[in-house]
Image (cartoon, helix red, strand yellow):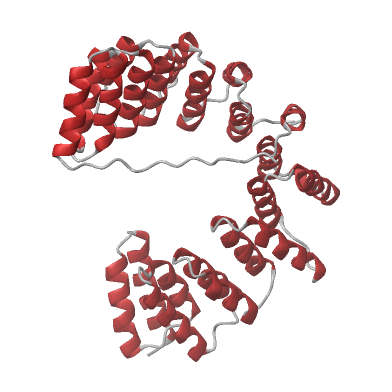
């Protein structure tokens, strides 16, 4: 077949991939193998479509046989493919055998971060420097992300010094990542200085600063930053609203939580289940159980189990039998074999002195042979 034919095959497979028709694309790939030898472009399109480890290994083997494995894009695609199937050993094997340029280093660093191996990611970065290679913005972003996972403040300061020395802080994505890294490593003061020093603050800048205050339990500072964000003309997204709701909940700021909900409506952001869950949690923590139950009844969709469990826990803390009965009933409709609602309802009855009801609920647990997951405690013996 002519070169134009392989282009046609690749175009068809690419089209199926963009339409998320994985099976159809793989069928065409199998048919192509009968008439035309796939090239690296074909394999690059097929690798992300592999829905089993065996399929990915087959494409890898074909790449070895055809001698195209040395191409950078194919090496990085193979690394990401094996990472999807949590085969980090194969990721390392592909990395060690293939061409080692910056995109390949970025891939091996990135997959280790995604797999929650930040220490290995940092060591790969050190190896990159020892090889005399120059990292790019993607490398630096991965390094900052790894440092944020490790939560080592001294390392965070070293990373920032490297970033400034190389001039990467001029990139907005990197500067935002530095703010997030310092907040997660416990240095909210430096995070604030970096934030205030930004020439231009985009939506991500505001989001990471607000989240930083939330991580440090400073709900009031988070709300103040949120107000400044709105005054600056930057429109908050649903992630920012979730973060603000969480801040209000943990700080017990009920009135402000209601204002945030109104702000969502004004900004045209549709409230999702996460937002309602945060609002219910906020009201429950402060003992406003009737208002919280009112939110549950007015939800546009079916409440999540997490939302109801939060409210049931609040009923137990504040001793509200009436709403506790209603919420436990809703939870048991979702999952009749879940012993959790029975146990909490029994505790609510016991706290209210309704021992006969508590005994009935416990008897129901035994009759249905439900078992609550056993808890455990850690005792540290002082010497």
Residue at 32% over, 59% down? 19
Residue 1 in view in this figure: yes
Residue at 34% over, 78% down? 29
Above or below for 123 versus 295: below
Q: Position of residue 320 (x, y in %)?
A: 30, 13
Depth order, front residue of 147/206: 147
Quadrant occupied by the N terminus: bottom left
Q: Position of residue 81 (x, y in %)?
A: 47, 68
Residue 270 in view in this figure: no
Depth order, front residue of 365/64: 365
Residue at 41% over, 82% down? 58
Depth order, front residue of 21/335: 335
Depth order, front residue of 194/266: 194
Quadrant occupied by the C terminus: top right
Query: Residue 53: which quarter of the image?
Result: bottom left
Residue lying furthest front:
383
Query: Residue 35: which quarter of the image?
Result: bottom left
In the rendered view, does 179 fall on the left or right side of 34? right
Residue at 37% over, 82% down? 5
Residue lying furthest left:
367
Q: Position of residue 229 (x, y in %)?
A: 60, 21
């Amino acid at each position: 077949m002519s070169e134009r034919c392989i282009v046609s095959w690749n175009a068809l497979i690419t089209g199926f991939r963009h339409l998320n028709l994985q099976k159809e694309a793989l069928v065409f790939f199998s048919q192509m193998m009968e008439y035309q030898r796939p090239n690296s472009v074909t394999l690059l399109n097929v690798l992300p479509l592999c829905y089993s480890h065996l399929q990915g290994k087959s494409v890898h083997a074909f790449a070895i046989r055809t001698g195209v494995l040395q191409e950078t894009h194919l090496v990085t695609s193979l690394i990401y493919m094996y990472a999807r199937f949590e085969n980090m050993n194969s990721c390392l094997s592909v990395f060690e055998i293939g061409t080692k340029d910056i995109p390949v280093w970025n891939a091996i660093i990135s997959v280790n971060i995604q797999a929650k191996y930040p220490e290995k990611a940092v060591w790969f970065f050190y190896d990159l420097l020892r090889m005399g290679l120059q990292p790019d913005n993607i490398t630096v972003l991965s390094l900052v992300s790894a440092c944020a996972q490790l939560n080592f403040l001294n390392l965070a300061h070293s990373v920032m010094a490297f970033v400034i020395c190389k001039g990467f802080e001029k990139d907005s994505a990197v500067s935002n990542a530095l703010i997030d890294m310092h907040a997660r490593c416990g240095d909210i003061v430096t995070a604030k200085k970096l934030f205030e020093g930004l020439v231009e603050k985009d939506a991500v800048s505001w989001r990471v600063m607000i989240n930083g205050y939330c991580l440090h339990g400073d709900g009031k500072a988070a709300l103040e930053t949120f107000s400044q964000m709105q005054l600056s003309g930057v429109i908050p997204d649903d992630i920012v609203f979730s973060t603000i709701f969480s801040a209000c909940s943990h700080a017990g700021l009920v009135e402000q939580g209601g204002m945030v909900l109104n702000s969502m409506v004004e900004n045209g952001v549709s409230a999702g289940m996460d937002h309602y869950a945060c609002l219910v949690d906020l009201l429950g923590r402060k003992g406003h159980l009737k208002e919280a139950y009112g939110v549950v009844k007015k939800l546009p969709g079916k409440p999540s189990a997490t939302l109801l469990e939060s409210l049931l826990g609040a009923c137990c803390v504040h001793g509200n039998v009436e709403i506790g009965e209603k919420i436990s009933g809703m939870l048991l409709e979702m999952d009749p074999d879940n012993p959790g609602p029975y146990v909490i309802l029994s505790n609510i009855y016991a706290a209210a002195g309704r021992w006969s009801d508590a005994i009935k609920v416990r008897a129901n647990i035994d009759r249905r042979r439900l078992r609550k997951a056993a808890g455990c405690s850690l005792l540290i013996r002082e010497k």
